[in-house]
Image (spheres, rainbow, N blue to C red):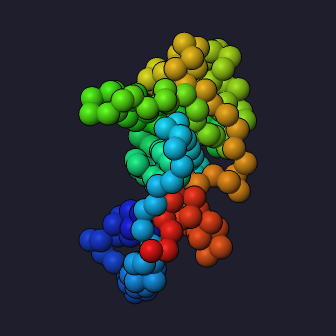
Amino acid sequence: MFMTSVLAQYSQDPTRAHCEVAKQVVHYLKTTCDLELTYSGVTTTIVSYSDADHASQLHWHSISGYVFLIRGGVMAWSSKKQPIVTLSTMEAEYVAAPHAKKEALWLHALTKEPTPPLTMLTILHCDNQSAIALSKDGQHHMQTKHDDIHFHFICKAVENESITLIYCPTGSMTVDLLTKPLNCSKMGGHVAGLGLLLA
């Protein structure tokens, strides 16, 4: 998904290099066509991950991503360019968290209708401890005072205990495959983390 979105930025004027990367994407799809989404376990707790890749693109906008899993399999995901240019990794992660929280609210409302409600969506994994601390202290700081107020929505969510941000080491951040290029071994580990297993 990440590589496809990067390539799409050059669709009007692709170079030979872009065509080579497109071939790699097709090769990846061909070699992973035997994977299927697998759900296991009995818990109905939803596990979620939020991440951002700070200013890695030529447009300087960070790429936000989130993924929600239930019973070991992915049920919702997103990867998109942030609407503002952030000045630090902490700020990029802080901007990414509200998008995941809004998806969590929608999923919780959705599950009330056709089935018994799932366990309340409260845990969001984040790999930036400064962003987690900022979401908990509820204070506006010099480095974030220029952010739109809707990005501080996550502070209110933490304050009213509808979500809890907890630290997840970068190496275990499953959503990395939606926000940045990865080597083969990391890609394989994160794909399995999404519940995509051999048929």
Residue toward you, 38 or 140: 38
Residue 117's place in the image compared with 72, above or below, is above
Point out residue 175 in the picture as x, y percentages from the top left corner.
55, 53
Judged left or right of residue 10, residue 140 is right
Residue visible at 27% across and 29% down in the picture: 113
Residue toward you, 150 or 87: 150
Residue toward you, 77 or 122: 122
> In the picture, residue 165 is in which quadrant?
top right
Point out residue 43 in the picture as x, y percentages from the top left corner.
53, 40
Q: Quadrant location of the N terminus?
A: bottom left
Residue toward you, 182 or 48: 48
Judged left or right of residue 92, residue 134 is right
Residue 147's place in the image compared with 169, above or below, is above
Q: Quadrant location of the C terminus?
A: bottom left
Judged left or right of residue 168, residue 49 is left
Point out residue 110 in the picture as x, y percentages from the top left corner.
31, 32
Residue 195's place in the image compared with 54, above or below, is below
Point out residue 3 in the picture as x, y percentages from the top left corner.
45, 68
Residue visible at 57% across and 17% down in the picture: 161
The residue lying furthest to the front in this view is 42
Residue visible at 54% across and 65% down in the picture: 191
Does residue 147 show up?
no
